[in-house]
Amino acid sequence: MTARPFGTSDRLRPFGESVFATISRLAARYGAVNLGQGFPNFDGPEFVKDAAIRAIREGRGQYARTFGLPEVTRAVAARFRATSGVEVDPDAEVTVTSGCTEASAAVMLGLVNPGDEVVLVEPFYDSYPACVAMAGGTVRTVRLRAPDFAFPLEDLRKAVGPRTKAILVNTPHNPLGRVLTRAELEGIAAIARAADCLVISDEVYEEIWYGEPHLSISTLPGMRERTVVLSSLGKTFSLTGWKIGWSIAPPALSAGVRAAHQFLTFCSATPLQRASVDALSAPRAYYEGLRADYRARRDLLLAELRGAGLDPYEPEGSYFVVAPHAGFGFAGDVEFVMHLVEKVGVACIPCSAFHMPGPDGCKDAEARSLVRFAFCKTPETLRAAGERLRSMGRVGRS
Ligand code: GLN
């Protein structure tokens, strides 16, 4: 026996287990319809799967170039040119990673020094603050607030200072479904330029929007040189388990990302990288079909939630819907989610998990007011969730 206190490092202990792992485990234990973790319960396209099978059969089984197979970095650059109009050098500016989650870790570890500040926008994807912590950085937060979740530019101006290394922006937004407007992005860009800091732009839901199209902040004046764009194959091609993501950034920033990436994973799975070339060459009709499918799924889930007495916010993008639980008589989002998963048989995510954890969990009433439902599910699954939710008694709305 050792007397030394072995265990999780001080850097990571505050973050506990990822909410997605917890909720998927609970959903399985209680046999709940799982609208928690954002993974499609349908398969990715046959043409992409076939390409991966071909790559395996052709013997593409060894390590790839660390920052990505040349044909993949070229395909990412070509797709970025098609969507944003911006020309990037695939050899110097694109880095293929094991999903966007690894890309965000590599960005933080490769570009943030201990003591640097990174501004995060609550509610946020739970891995961001953990990645900042791994890099020894300090998190500052601003918050998107109901009812319109408009970007709080004034708060951002106050949160940014001489130690700010980067502002992390996510649009289309997980979990709120906001698609930031040109005016909002111009506001953020002006603040980043004035503070001479970087912007890390998580754009994994770039193809999933229902009104105004997605706009990358990297395309605004003076932003290309200070922005790291992150995206992935997972959401656009319903292949979240393939873990193929990438960063796009000018050479000096890409050098930092690559410095970390080579020691994190060295390279991402070669045959899956190879297949992403076929994915990224999909015709325009593929993306239009994806959006039409998701619009139908969104509208179905909104109707099901409304039918159950919830009052969801209509998302402009992404595949998530948030709704307040006020009126159902629960102290917080975690209590409501536990009731749903155990007694009603539907799993969803408590949005307090997308806020900075306090010393004994998140106690902030605003952070605990919303729950998130994922609609990257078949219509049958969304209807089954609705049916169960309708069985839930209401305790009067506030
Ligand atoms: N991005 C997904 C979500 O928000 C989950 C990713 C993960 O589980 N690591 O649901």
Image: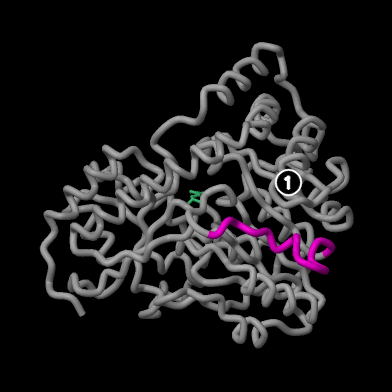
Apparent side of residue 361 relative to residue 280 in the rendered image (left or right): left
Question: Ligand 1 near label 1 (Cβ, under 8 Å)?
Answer: no
For mark 1, what is the residue?
80
**For residue 281, above or below residue 24:** above
Membership of 88 in magenta stretch: no
Q: Give the range drawn in magenta.
A: 212-225
Please give the count of numbered marks on the rendered protein: 1
Q: Measuring 19% from the left and 54% from the top, which residue is drawn there? A: 389
Looking at the picture, which amino acid does disc 1 mark? Phe
Quarter of the image for residue 43 reads: top left
The location of residue 280, given as percent across then percent down, is 66, 34
**For residue 201, above or below residue 259:** below
Decide which of 377, 210 is in the foreground and name it: 210
Decide which of 371, 294 is in the foreground and name it: 294
The location of residue 357, given as percent across then percent down, is 48, 71
Label 1 crowd bin: few (<14), some (14–19), many (20+), radius 10 Å: some
The location of residue 167, given as percent across then percent down, is 68, 71
Quarter of the figure that contains the C terminus: bottom left
**For residue 268, above or below residue 83:** above
Give SS at disc 1: helix
Apparent side of residue 345 relative to residue 180 in the rendered image (left or right): left
